[in-house]
Amino acid sequence: VRDGYKITIAGPPNAGKSSLLNRLISKERAIVTSIPGTTRDIIEESLNLDGFPFVVSDTAGIRETDNEIEKIGVSRSLDLLKNSDLIIFLVDGSKSFDFDNNELFDEIKKFPYIFVVNKTDLFSSNVSRETFLFKDNNPVFISASKNTGIDELKKNIIEYFKKNFTSTESYIVPNKRQFHLLKKINTNIDSILNLSDDFFEIELISYDLNNCIKLCSELIGEAVSPDILDKVFGDFCIGK
């Protein structure tokens, strides 16, 4: 139950995470500079790929730092990893990467992730595609600044979610209002089941059942109060 599947872009500072977010959503949402540590708070944006709704988060670059504000951003980034449906682990392709001695990568590997190498336009004789090929890993190579490889990354994201999140048991509740309505419906149903063995509780059962009907009507839009309309339309920009 969510506003979209959670995708987190994580990686070391200055790997190009903000540039990648901007490319994925096709607008300049995150500030991009050459200074490591520019992003210090989490930036979230909605994205829809092939019918899948996503919330994509750009996080602070994860590294050891003495800056107190940056430390908070790093801590939030690490917390976000645990609640992600998929992590895009982004590294700088202009630099070599130590797979065997990297604490961040060791943490990332605990969760579902796609390994993405950015800045492929800056490959050199010392650092190339082969530098990032290891074991069973299949990196996606991109250049966020040149807008290359982004479609391939999107394809990988779609394939992952089609494979792992399209079973009959997987579903999405589009928004928090509907989520809370479903919780209320579930509470009433539990109450009905608990009272169903006692004939003398028929009035209470009828009360809970009536509540369920009202909540279901509200959920599908058959019974809509002015307060609900204000809430729904307050979330959208309606043109004249």
Image (cartoon, rainbow, N blue to C red):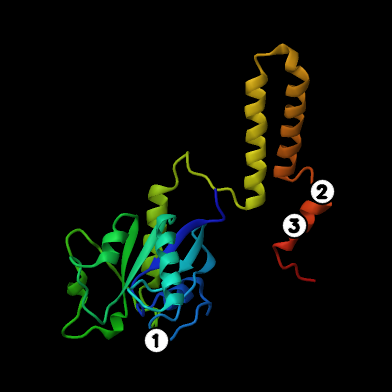
Q: What percent of the width, then of the height, locates residue 194?
A: 63, 22
Q: Under tag 3, what secondary structure? A: helix
Q: Name the residue under label 3.
A: 231
Q: Under tag 1, what secondary structure? A: loop
Q: Under tag 2, what secondary structure? A: loop
For residue 45, above or below residue 206: below
Whichever of labels 3 and 1 marks the residue nearer the N terminus, that label is 1
Please state which of residues 212 and 144 is positioned toward the viewer in this rendering.
Answer: 212
Furthest residue in direction right, as rendered: 226
**Quick one: label 3, few (<14), some, or many (20+) residues within 10 Å?**
few
Distance of label 3 from label 2 (alpha carbons): 10 Å
Q: Which residue is drawn at 19% across and 80% down?
A: 127
**Is label 3 in contact with label 1 (beta carbons under 8 Å)?**
no
Residue 118 quadrant? bottom left
Numbered mark located on residue 67 in the image: none
Q: Residue at x 44, y 81 (%)?
A: 38
**Quick one: label 2, few (<14), some, or many (20+) residues within 10 Å?**
few
User: Is there any visible trace of residue 188 in the rendered image?
Assistant: yes
Give, as a three-letter code, the residue at label 1.
Ile
Q: What percent of the width, then of the height, locates residue 49?
A: 49, 61
- Give the number of the mark in front: 2 or 1: 1
Q: What percent of the width, then of the height, locates residue 95?
A: 24, 80
Q: Mark 1 points at which residue?
A: 35
Numbered mark located on residue 225 in the image: 2
Distance of label 2 from label 1 (alpha carbons): 51 Å
Q: Residue at x 74, y 13 (%)?
A: 200
